């Protein structure tokens, strides 16, 4: 408990700078079950003020700061294709293949999304590619695919992303038993997607391509939003116009319209049947004019949330009021979801993927990209490539060091918390390790018989 650990006078690490009146008020609030997230803020401010003065100055002179600089230096090292081992193709994106990869130094697995340089240039996709990279770099959410590395090769720009082994929702809807999901599963996915959209909106990012194939499952059955190529960052209060996305799931220039597909209860799209051949103009008309229909499989709560999310009037649509996501989360469709526990990662998914199964197309079924002809790369493209090729992203890289136990293995000090040799400035550097040729010649060198 926070109070017992940091504010109780009996604790060895008690915050003595906090006065009795403050600690008593906190204790009374806890006893009366009147606590809230701002409860410890006054004491937290005292702790920040104390740590920012003498304690921080002492830290800057300590061996711990030197070790921190070593880690930051390691984090900033150049990233190339040799940083990774590349494995099987998982799928294809708009500009190239997506394959599994592994960091050689740590063993951490990721997905590598390759954007072929010539294909990007031919389709004038530089702005779109850079936009996706910059938005991914800004977001750190358990409900959105995270960017760990960005680098370039001779032929491609590469985004190294969270590996999602569980497949996408489209695959599960259409290829795993009867089409569609049980409502418990649909509620869970809708709740996590809503949390992902909330995290994006908190950074003023509008996601504009929400559809089942862009929602991916991890090893434990939790979902993340992927493919942010069409996302856009806006200033607070700014609207956005234009029409992008996939026919049948498309939003029409309304930021709140990205909420319209958070309920995958039944497998057909609300405005276009699967594999139905129809002109875009007809889909547009249906979206704007037709009332969607619901089968008997929909519960009252499910039908209600869908109808409110798909309301033709944006001012009446669920989540469009000042309450925003609080209004969405309060809907009875989510009555069994504790969003605080969900956002803390404490929920178990109703479906956990089989670790022995492969939830994607066979490698032979994935269509190959044709060769791009008539496009040449030249030095004028280097400015764009330099903006893309930025190496590791801090938080995912640091998480990788912890998860793979590299931090535990390397972050060691001397006995009794004394500096290790690598932290002593007057310590001579270790002798270079002999090369392979030197070691071979040493073995062949005749021994002195005297």
Image: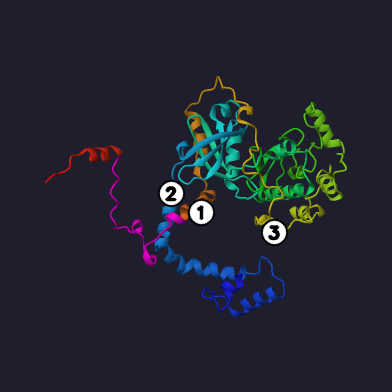
Instruction: Provide residue 232's location: percent of width, then percent of height.
Output: 65, 41
Residue drawn at (77%, 52%), measured in percent from left and top?
Answer: 328
Picture quadrant of residue 277:
top right
Mark 3 vs 1, N-terminal side: 3
Q: Of residues 110 and 156, which is closer to you in this image?
A: 110
Residue 177 falls left or right of residue 118: right
Range shown magenta: 408-435
Q: Of residues 228 and 273, which is closer to you in this image?
A: 273
- The rendered magenta stretch, by its main secondary structure, is classed as loop
| Colouring mode (rainbow / by chain / secondary structure / one colour) | rainbow
Q: Say which residue label 1 marks.
A: 402
Q: Is residue 434 magenta?
A: yes
CA distance separating discs 3 and 2? 35 Å
CA distance separating discs 2 and 1? 14 Å
Residue drawn at (74%, 53%), measured in percent from left and top?
Answer: 325
Disc marking residue 212: none
Picture quadrant of residue 8:
bottom right
Instruction: Provide residue 13's location: percent of width, then percent of height.
Output: 52, 73
CA distance separating discs 3 and 1? 25 Å
Q: Is residue 211 visible?
A: no
Instruction: Provide residue 100's location: percent of width, then percent of height.
Output: 56, 38
Q: Is residue 326 above or below residue 217?
A: below
Disc marking residue 340: 3
């Amino acid at each position: 408990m926070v109070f017992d650990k940091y504010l109780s006078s009996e604790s060895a690490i008690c915050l003595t700078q906090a006065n009795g009146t403050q600690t008593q008020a906190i204790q009374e609030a806890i006893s009366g079950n009147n606590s809230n997230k701002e409860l410890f803020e006054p004491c937290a401010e005292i702790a920040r003020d104390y740590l920012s003065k003498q304690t921080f100055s002492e830290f800057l002179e300590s061996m711990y700061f030197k070790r921190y600089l070593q880690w930051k230096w390691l984090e900033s090292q150049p990233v190339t294709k040799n940083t990774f081992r590349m494995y099987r193709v998982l799928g294809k994106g708009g500009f190239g293949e997506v394959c599994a990869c592994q960091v050689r130094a740590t063993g951490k697995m990721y997905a590598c999304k390759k954007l072929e340089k010539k294909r990007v240039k031919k389709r004038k996709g530089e702005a779109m590619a850079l936009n996706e990279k910059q938005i991914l770099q800004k977001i750190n959410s358990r409900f959105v695919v995270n960017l760990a590395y960005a680098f370039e090769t001779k032929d491609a720009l590469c985004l190294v992303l969270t590996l999602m082994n569980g497949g996408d929702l489209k695959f599960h809807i259409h290829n795993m038993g009867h089409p569609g999901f049980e409502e418990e599963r649909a509620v869970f996915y809708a709740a996590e997607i809503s949390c992902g959209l909330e995290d994006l909106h908190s950074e003023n990012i509008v996601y504009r391509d929400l559809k089942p194939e862009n929602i991916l499952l991890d090893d434990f059955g939790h979902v993340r939003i992927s493919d942010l190529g069409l996302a856009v960052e806006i200033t607070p209060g700014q609207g956005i116009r234009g029409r992008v996305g996939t026919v049948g799931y498309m939003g029409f220039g309304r930021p709140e319209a990205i909420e319209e597909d958070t309920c995958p209860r039944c497998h057909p799209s609300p405005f276009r049947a699967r594999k139905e051949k129809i002109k875009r103009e007809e889909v547009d008309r249906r979206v704007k004019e037709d009332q969607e229909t619901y089968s008997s499989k929909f519960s009252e709560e499910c039908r209600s949330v869908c109808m409110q999310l798909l309301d033709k009037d944006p001012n009446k649509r669920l989540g469009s009021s000042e309450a925003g996501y609080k209004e969405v989360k309060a809907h009875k469709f989510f009555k069994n979801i504790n969003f605080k526990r969900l956002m803390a990662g404490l929920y178990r998914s109703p479906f956990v993927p089989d670790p022995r199964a492969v939830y994607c197309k066979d490698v032979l079924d994935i269509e190959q990209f044709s060769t791009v002809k008539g496009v040449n790369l030249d030095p004028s493209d280097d400015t764009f490539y330099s903006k893309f090729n930025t190496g590791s992203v801090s938080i995912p890289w640091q998480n990788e060091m912890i998860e793979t136990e590299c931090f535990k293995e390397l972050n060691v000090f001397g006995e009794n918390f004394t500096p290790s040799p690598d932290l002593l400035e007057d310590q001579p550097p270790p002798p270079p390790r002999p090369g392979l040729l030197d070691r071979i010649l040493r073995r062949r060198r005749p021994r002195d018989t005297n």
